[in-house]
Amino acid sequence: MDTEQPTAEIPTEPVILPRAEHTISRKQIDENSLKVLYRLRRHGYKAYLVGGGVRDLLLGRTPKDFDVGTDATPNQVKKLFRNCFLVGRRFRLAHIRFAGGSLIEVATFRRQATEEDRPEDPSLNPFYAENLFGTPRQDAFRRDFTINALFYDIEDFSIIDHVGGLRDLRDQRLRVIGDPLVRFAEDPVRMLRALEFVARLGFSLDETAREAIYLRSALIAEAAPARLREELMELFRHKVAGHVFANAQGLGLLEYIIPGYQAGPGTLALLDAIDRRTAAGQPVTESLVLAALYYEIFSAGLVAAGDLPIGEVLGRAAKLLIPHCLHFHIASGIRHQAAELLVGCYRLQRGPGRRGQQRFVRHPSFAAALAFYQLCCEAGQGDVELLSAWRQSLTETPKEAPRKRPRRRRRRRKPASSPSQS
Ligand code: ATP
Ligand code: MG
């Protein structure tokens, strides 16, 4: 595909905003990124700030990180920086590490692969398409969305826009570079990223992109599960999981991201509750995410089953979580924690005052289950009165009977024949 063909929407010439016409100042850019940019520049290479950092600065947001684009090859970058490591099998990058653990990613400008670039036997070099170096303009066109393809040039502090990203930033619109049908077929994970950025930035999704997601949704089933797992956790970290799951489900994408999965209204409300909690500063774990994704289905299955032994309930939780965890290669420890949250909710649902209640309250999983159940209640998925009854019972539950003095381990009396040591 030639994404460089100018269209009605894509300008033939880049728009260049000189320093006086934009708001990005060097004070906003982290010191280590500036060091990298200046050093590349001093050695005669082009050096741009690229990607999400430029986008976020122009939107007045704090960037998560700053990425650098350059025409120096990874090996040339390595020669310039002592603290540089080349990484990435799929996408070769230079990582420059600084004291204090900060890390700057430097990528050589790349271009989109064409038919001619295809090696005779791609299996010998499966990532050839990701590593074809190109011009800055080509590098802008191989990126995913127009707002993610802006460059900040350290040479004169201007912003360079090859793809109409400045206009889309102004109009608060997320637009794919090139034909969305083609770009989503190339890399189906872009469909999920599109929904993520729309939610994070509060932008509208360009109509052609929306239609293309609807038409191409099934392709995402072929994406590497490890990548999807990571992107899904990103949604939670960015507090947009509820929004994106609802959108992805509406467009028919969700069932291909998590094979066969359907999020009920209760689940979507629960994800919203998690997002609100994350926004309030609480970290989100993968076990919590897993429990939230399956809580509604799990509870529905138990309603009809009546009172069950806990072992059986645990078995049901595991059975529900195993296919998901196998697909995404999620470790059994995480699965186990998620199952404990689900079973903990079941025990909470039975109410305080049952036999074994005190043992449950002292169990290490109790606090997490109670916090999770509170989220369920916030999402209309739990019994609020039951929750306060538990809270009340907690204040009344005696801690394990306090002992006056720490128990001394009694020494076993030694057989008379052994020599005394004291
Ligand atoms: P943030 O880091 O805030 O989530 P970002 O835009 O920096 O957002 P990254 O995932 O860090 O996103 O990627 C950096 C840049 O690399 C993007 O801005 C985009 O230009 C490009 N990019 C990332 N993923 C893709 C992709 N799948 N296809 C094309 N370009 C991509
Ligand atoms: Mg980034």
Image (cartoon, rainbow, N blue to C red):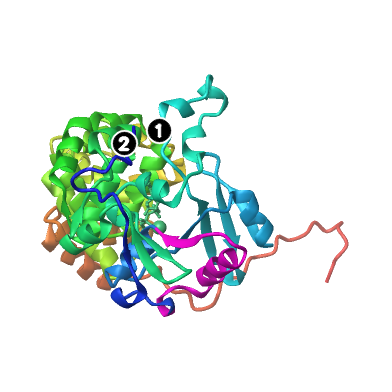
Q: Residue at x 30, y 32 (%)?
A: 185
Closer to the camera in the image, 269 or 399 = 269
Judge from the rendering whether residue 354 lies leftward or rightward of residue 126; answer left or right.
Answer: left
Relative image position of residue 12 (x, y in whole percent): 28, 49
Residue 288 is situated, as x and y percent measured from the top left of the image, at 32, 52
Residue 164, quarter of picture: bottom left
- Quadrant placement of the C terminus: bottom right
Counting residues from the N terminus, which is met first, the one under dot 2 or under dot 1?
2
Image quarter in which the N terminus is found: top left
Image position, residue 370 (x, y; %): 27, 60
Callout 1: SS:
helix
Of the pair 191 and 289, the residue shown nearer to us = 191
- Residue 158 appears in view: yes
Is residue 403 rendered to the left or right of residue 214?
right
**Rendered position, 17 above or below 112:** below
- The boundaries of the magenta stretch are 27-50
Res. 170 mark = none
Q: Is residue 40 magenta?
A: yes
Give the amino acid type for the residue marked by disc 2 in the picture: Pro
**Residue at image mark 1:** 326
Q: Is residue 202 above or below residue 337?
A: below
Residue depth check, mark 2 versus mark 1: number of the one nearer the observer: 2
User: Horizontally, is 350 left or right of 53 in the view?
Assistant: left
Q: Amino acid at mark 1?
A: Leu
Residue under the point 31% across and 42% down: 190
User: Can the viewer see residue 342?
Assistant: no
The residue pinned by badge 2 equals: 188
